[in-house]
Image (cartoon, rainbow, N blue to C red):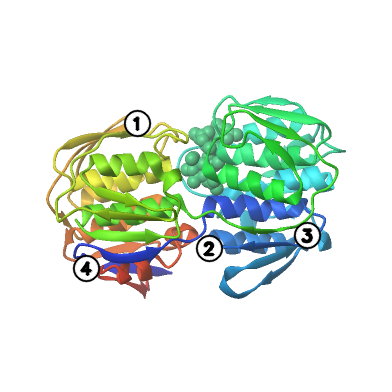
Amino acid sequence: MDKLLIDGSPPLTGEVKISGAKNAVLPILAATLLGSSTSTISNVPHLNDVTTTMSLLARMGCTITMGDNMVVDVDPTTINDYTAAYELVRTMRASILVLGPLVARYGQAEVSLPGGCAIGARPVNLHIEGLRAMGADISIDGGYIRARAGRLQGTRIAFDMVTVTGTENLLMAAALAKGETVFENAAREPEVVDLANYLIAMGAKIEGAGTSTIHVQGVDQLMGTDYSVVPDRIETGTYLVGACVTRGKIKVRDTVPEILTSVLDKLREAGAHITTGEDWIELDMKGQRPKSVSISTAPYPDFPTDMQAQFCVLNALADGTAKVTENVFENRFMHISELQRMGADMTVDGNSVTIRGVERLKGAPVMATDLRASASLILAAFMADGQTEVGRVYHIDRGYERIEEKFHMLGAEIQRVPDR
Ligand code: UD1
């Protein structure tokens, strides 16, 4: 296993290119299962979660071909096994996304209950209830979800709470169901919209993706197609926060400013000068220390939970005091104790943390506990005196492509070494 050694950073300067979105490519790769022919997916990020998903599909019998520049062909017609085994899915909760497509297209699925980040209980009851409402027979046995169905039936599904992968799983199922499915209180995340656009390109009839009510008219068949994955808004935000805390100036390319509005608003409030073009964002701190900004996470279009840990670091180094409130997950403050070990002044009270900014942090050996928490530790290390050692780098590799190379190009003193 590797670790990262970080010896601080001057103000980050330069340009960085953003990869395809992890949270869009995973449902899109799962949705290739719905097709009656090969799909060619491009702008695929090189991430461990993507490799896991491709292994999952290959294990089912799909024929996968990797071209140059991470263009991936998936031919689902050679499928001969409808199982997602525990050994593959335990590292990645998003593996649940094959459930809807398998049931809708092949009438059967055995999917291990997911593992993934240790950020709260994260049940999948809404996925299961939705498929049952569409006519699937589902039992849970030995840690597996076992599903059987004839052709699924369209129905009305009103989600009790906003669930991103729940919306995606049922959207994929509804695409091949008989009749109309109406989703209420659906997730509005840009990655849901990207999945819907891919399904529409395959021949699905979907209206309202990106709003909380989605209408799907089921069709008899979907065909494989070519599709390019939307850029990663969380990766974009992470680099912008890096420039903000180091008082630097960077230009982020190959991104989509419109899907980062809540994050850009908070960065402006922190004192960042931000300009945007069609596919780029430039952030300039003009050498100034950021100001504290309170945030409260909620489903899109509000402030994303996946940027909460990074903004804890921003506030740890900012001028002033701020309150960060986590409303989406019940246990997503594991990075706080690691940041406190680096000298951050933070007090947790329930699902909120009060953060009083300090000028500098102190390097320390720290442990990554989940994907975004890991990224926040790297950002903290940039403004720490002495060396920081970030362990358990596999969390970072699940969701950030070549993070140490990209930050190194922007000026950070960061290197990956084997952890023995
Ligand atoms: C997705 C993202 C993740 C992000 C999260 C919230 C992917 C692969 N992952 O995760 O990066 O942090 O959205 O934006 O896209 N819940 C239930 N029952 C369910 C489903 C969810 O109670 O059946 C609860 C969860 O415990 C959580 C909340 O709903 O408290 C939101 O979870 P959800 O939106 O489903 O998160 P994921 O789709 O797993």
Task: Give the amino acid type for the residue marked by disc 4 in the picture.
Answer: Asp
Q: Are marks 3 and 2 in contact (CB under 8 Å)?
A: no
Q: Which residue is mark 3?
A: 76
Asked whether 294 or 215 is in front, the reply is 215
Task: Give the amino acid type for the residue marked by disc 2 in the picture.
Answer: Pro
Q: Which residue is mark 1?
A: 351
Tell me the distance, in whole angstroms, between the alpha carbons under discs 3 and 2.
21 Å
Compared with 109, 47 (above or below) is below
- Foreground tag (1 vs 3): 3
Question: Callout 1: helix, strand or loop?
Answer: loop
Q: Quick check: 43 left or right of 416?
A: right
Q: Determine the image quadrant of residue 79.
A: bottom right
- Foreground tag (2 vs 4): 2
Q: Which mark is residue 7?
A: 4
- Mark 1 or mark 4, which is nearer the start of the sequence? 4
Q: Position of residue 117 (x, y in %)?
A: 48, 48
Instruction: Name, please, the residue furthest toward the left.
Output: 359
Residue 342 showing in the rendered view = yes
Residue 98 showing in the rendered view = no
- Foreground tag (2 vs 1): 2
Question: Callout 4: helix, strand or loop?
Answer: loop
Compared with 38, 206 (above or below) is above
Q: Position of residue 80 (x, y in %)?
A: 83, 59
Residue at 31% x, 70% y: name it.
Answer: 408
Task: Give the amino acid type for the residue marked by disc 1 in the picture.
Answer: Asn
- Mark 2 or mark 3, which is nearer the start of the sequence? 2
- Ligand 1 within 8 Å, label 1 CB: no
- Ligand 1 within 8 Å, label 3 CB: no
